[in-house]
Image (spheres, rainbow, N blue to C red):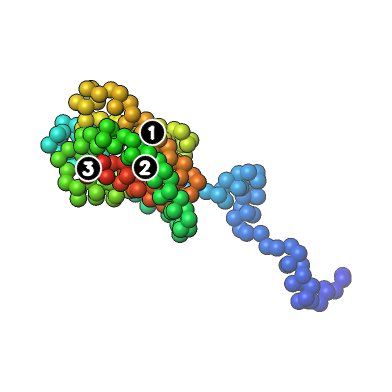
């Protein structure tokens, strides 16, 4: 019978480094005869933190907006608050429980591009269409509101809800054009019941408003893709001030 070789700690350390230990979980999966793809699926477990289908949230918010139409014209502010609040609620739930992208530390040049794009879109409309389209539209969209209330809606409530939902939540799952179209559809469902008389009386002006809303929403989606979520947020705030708030004050 051969005598046992003496214990060599250096040789033992080399053997361990050349043959790393296998995790117990890997041994268990190997014993079960699982394939490498199955083991990868087990290692990368699906993230169950999703807050549900964002399109379903869009349908709920749109249905709430339509259902609150009987509140018009006495409670326009309440209807806007509840409708935008529904969008913001879905977005916040996705932010807390889901995988929606967070706003990180942004570079100043990205925020500057957001402001620049908003000014480039808004100034031509403000110069050429303010007395004909923008000022009457602002009066019909926000009837009876004070300048302070409207400023709060255009700077805080509307950009918060729509940016987080459409550019933060939907844009991560849907295509560029579809997000812009859904955001425009949302604006039509939200705004047109408030200004229905003007829509019926002036179809040409209504068509210009729809085109403007589509251009605004496509711009926000583009800025989100090019410069980030915070830039799209800033872009919508500045565009709201140029296209809606300044004509409202005139």
From the top left corner, tell me how far across and down residue 193 is, in percent: 22, 30
From the top left corner, tell me how far across and down residue 98 is, in percent: 41, 48
State the residue position of label 1: 214
Q: Residues within 10 Å of mark 3 (few under 14, many from 20)?
A: few
User: Earlier along the polypeptide chain: callout 2 or callout 3?
Assistant: 2
Whether residue 51 appears in this view of the structure is no
**Which residue sits at x=38%, y=33%?**
214
**Which residue sits at x=65%, y=46%?**
36
Query: Pointer 2 and pointer 3: residues touching (CB < 8 Å)?
Result: no
**Which residue sits at x=22%, y=42%?**
250
User: Earlier along the polypeptide chain: callout 3 or callout 1?
Assistant: 1
Q: Is residue 212 above or below residue 47?
A: above
Secondary structure at numbered mark 1 = helix
Measure the alpha-carbon separation of dots 2 and 1. Answer: 17 Å
Task: Name the image quarter holding residue 224.
Answer: top left
Q: Is residue 202 left or right of residue 13?
A: left
Query: Pointer 2 and pointer 1: residues touching (CB < 8 Å)?
Result: no
State the residue position of label 2: 123
Q: Is residue 148 left or right of residue 89?
A: left
Secondary structure at numbered mark 3 = loop
Q: Mark number for residue 241?
A: none
Whether residue 148 appears in this view of the structure is yes
Q: How many marks?
A: 3
Q: Residues within 10 Å of mark 1 (few under 14, many from 20)?
A: some
User: Earlier along the polypeptide chain: callout 2 or callout 1?
Assistant: 2
From the top left corner, tell me how far across and down residue 31 is, in percent: 65, 50
From the top left corner, tell me how far across and down residue 118 is, in percent: 39, 45
Q: Is residue 45 left or right of residue 121?
A: right
- Give 139 or 128, whichever is nearer the viewer: 128
Q: Mark number for residue 250?
A: 3
Q: Residues within 10 Å of mark 2 (few under 14, many from 20)?
A: some
**Which residue sits at x=52%, y=48%?**
45
């Amino acid at each position: 019978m051969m005598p046992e070789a003496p214990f060599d700690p250096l040789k033992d350390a080399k053997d361990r480094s050349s043959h790393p230990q296998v995790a117990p979980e890997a041994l268990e999966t190997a014993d079960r005869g699982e394939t490498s793809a199955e083991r990868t699926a087990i290692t990368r477990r699906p993230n169950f933190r999703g807050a549900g289908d964002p399109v379903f949230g869009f349908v709920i918010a749109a249905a709430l907006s339509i259902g609150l139409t009987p509140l018009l014209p006495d409670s326009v502010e309440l209807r806007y608050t509840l409708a935008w609040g529904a969008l913001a609620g879905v977005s916040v739930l996705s932010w807390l429980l889901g995988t929606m992208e967070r706003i990180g530390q942004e570079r100043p040049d990205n925020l500057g591009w957001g402001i620049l794009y908003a000014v480039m879109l808004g100034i031509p409309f403000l110069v050429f269409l303010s007395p004909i389209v923008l000022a009457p539209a602002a009066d019909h969209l926000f009837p009876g509101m004070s300048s302070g209330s409207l400023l709060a809606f255009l700077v805080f409530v509307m950009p918060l809800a729509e940016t987080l939902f459409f550019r933060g939540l939907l844009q991560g799952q849907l295509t560029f054009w579809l997000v812009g179209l859904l955001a425009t559809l949302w604006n039509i469902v939200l705004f047109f019941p408030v200004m229905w008389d003007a829509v019926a009386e002036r179809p040409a002006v209504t068509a210009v408003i729809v085109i403007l809303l589509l251009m605004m929403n496509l711009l926000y989606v583009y800025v989100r893709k090019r410069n980030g979520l915070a830039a799209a947020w800033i872009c919508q705030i500045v565009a709201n001030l140029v296209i809606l708030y300044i004509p409202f004050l005139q």
